Amino acid sequence: MPQYSPHRAPLSVFWVIVIALFILISATIVFAPAWTCAPFRLADLSSSGELPPPMPPGCVPMAEAVPDEMLQALENKRQQMGVELKETVSCVVPAAQAKRLDPQWLQKMYEGGTLRYRRHVLLAATQDSPKGLLFVVERCMTPWWKFVEESGTSCWAQFNF
């Protein structure tokens, strides 16, 4: 007949307590800054939906490479914000249509060259070219841990009630 050690049961209770404490501490770190925002945060973290970048009217997709100085400027902004690049979209507004384009369109749509919605960040830049107005947007994503940290005090600010 096999004999069981009497010390085996307290060891399993110990591991249950350790795991429960780990889960409790993890949940506190993620949700403590704003308990009421937890449902929104979970939806934002689990959503991998893309935010299509708003483009100026009449913008034609561009086949040529984007100038290096534009890409460098956008990369500097991306690194400063700490976001991850997902996609670069570029197009050209023909010169004839660029003259009719509202000069404040970019500032109205992309305040400061940036458009944010939850974890999604769109970085935009324009440059005059011989073909017209070159428009470049980088679709970026805020890392989940940074998003949770930043949204702690401002989760209700993105909703208008």
Image (tube, rainbow, N blue to C red):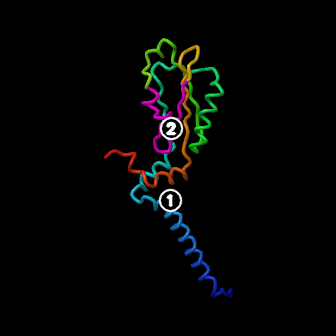
What residue is drawn where x is 46% and y is 44%?
A: 118
Residue 108 lies in the magenta-colored region: yes
Q: Which residues are magenta?
A: 105-126
Q: Quadrant of the N terminus?
A: bottom right
Is 24 in front, or is 113? 113
Q: Quadrant of residue 37?
A: bottom left
Q: Is residue 100 left or right of residue 127?
A: left
Q: Quadrant of residue 77?
A: top right
Looking at the image, is mark 1 or mark 2 earlier in the sequence?
Answer: 1
Residue 58 at x, y = what percent? 47, 18
Q: Which mark is residue 50?
A: 2
Q: What residue is shown with label 1? A: 30
What residue is drawn where x is 67% and y is 87%?
A: 3
The Cα–Cα distance between marks 1 and 2, rounded to whole angstroms, is: 24 Å
Residue 111 lies in the magenta-colored region: yes
Near mark 1 (Cα within 10 A), the count class, few <14, some 14-19 or many ≥20, is some
Near mark 2 (Cα within 10 A), the count class, few <14, some 14-19 or many ≥20, is few
